Amino acid sequence: MVGCSGEQAASTVSTIESEATVCGVGSTVKGIDVSYYQGTIDWNAVKNDGVAYAFIRVSDGEVFADPKFDSYWAGSRAAGIKHGAYQFFRPAQDPIAQADLLLSKIGNKLAADDLPPVVDVEASDGETAATVETKLHAWVDRVTTALGRAPIVYTGQYFWRDSVGGADFTSSPLWHAQYTTASCPTIAEPWHGWTFWQYTSSGTVAGISGDVDLDRYNGDKTSLLAFLGPAGSCGDGTCNAGESSLGCPEDCGGCGTIAAGGGTVDDGDRCFEPGGPLDYLRPVTTAGDAGDLIWTHATEDTSEANFATWHLVLAEAGRYEVEVYTAAAFAQSHRAKYVVEAGGETADVVIDQSSIDGWQSLGTFELVAGGHQSIHLGDNTGEPLANNVQLVFDSVRLTRVDDPTGEPPPSGGCATGGGSLGLVLSALLAGLRRRRR
């Protein structure tokens, strides 16, 4: 890291081995830390270069606010990069004012994509080790009280020993600074392990011109996600980080609403969510309900690799027939398993996509008003990949089959857009397995 004054983190860096050398647990996750010295950043390019998280400077002390913080914070979030804020700590300045400046930028709670904030301890400003320790405690206590979680301490072995007196701040995770090609860093005592390691200041990352600080997280991606701030609570009225119109329509606004009489969700709509490696999702613009569809190959794997989810947000509760569109030119799977989430229940419906060139019924379902209902289809149908069986993701159609009062249609009546309701119910009973969530 580089302070506003241009001071390099040289005092925190060492390549000398000692008994304090501590290796990681195994897997690590790539990250960076940035300040306005990086200039304009293409955050999507950064994400595509394998960067999973970024620490972004808030300020140098209480006086110099980093002019790029706000744009970097928003840009990293938009690109899907987890982020955290760091502050270059100035022991000669008011620690509470410094902490309050950081908190004013990130808010009083951590979002779902936030790392704990960082205090960058690499300058003594001529203060004694005892003074540095006292003021640092004040900063850490202020931030911990505000967020309910200890911040991260960034430092190096020798600076911590000589300028902070080896003080015990082990209640905070350690971000260790040491520019070396060694496989294991030499950390500051009394920490016994490191959470992050800044191992070079001369890295290269797509989307950023010039040298970049590179970091490693001590763990895999699952561990990193668990280290982040708490997820927002869906239904609290705020569209928190980690929430979206698909997963939390009541807070973030729905992806689209199906009218009382029914409607269609096509593979090109906002309520359609494809998943898995994009290279294996093949778009077609010459077939399908709306003139397009997506297909992938079916597999016999235990877990799905590619999949699709049609999210259902309804204006009114009622009984609806659910149909899927299967274009014969591309739909080949004989075991396509659609998972229907409706009204708090989950049902599996297996169909032969190749049997009908057009709309196929999955049955009738009681749906509730609002969101959190869906149709899901995965590629793990049980059909061998070697057979090159094509599985189609296209439109889902809902048709109301009761009147607005909730009364069923007369005996012998027909459901619009499908076959006889009796046949639909028979297919449902034959091919449907229900289970409570």
Image (cartoon, rainbow, N blue to C red):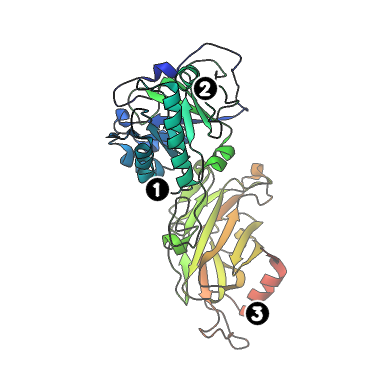
Q: Who's the residue at 54% across and 54% down the image? A: 308
Say which label, 1 or 2, has the lower sequence index.
1
* Residue 358 in view (yes/no): no
Asked which secondary structure carries label 2, the reply is loop
- Residue to which mark 2 is pinned: 166
- Residue to which mark 1 is pinned: 107
Q: CA distance from mark 1 to mark 3?
A: 57 Å
Q: Quadrant of residue 336?
A: bottom right
- Residue to which mark 3 is pinned: 422
Q: Is residue 392 above or below residue 406?
A: above
| Camera-side residue of 182 and 314 | 182
Q: Amino acid at mark 2?
A: Gly
Q: Who's the residue at 45% across and 24% down the image? A: 130
| Camera-side residue of 55 and 349 | 55
| Camera-side residue of 190 and 288 | 190
Q: Quadrant of the N terminus?
A: top left
Q: CA distance from mark 3 to mark 2?
A: 78 Å
* Residue 418 in view (yes/no): yes
Q: Indicate the position of residue 95 as horizontal and vertical percent values.
A: 38, 35
Q: Indicate the position of residue 111 as horizontal and vertical percent values.
A: 46, 48
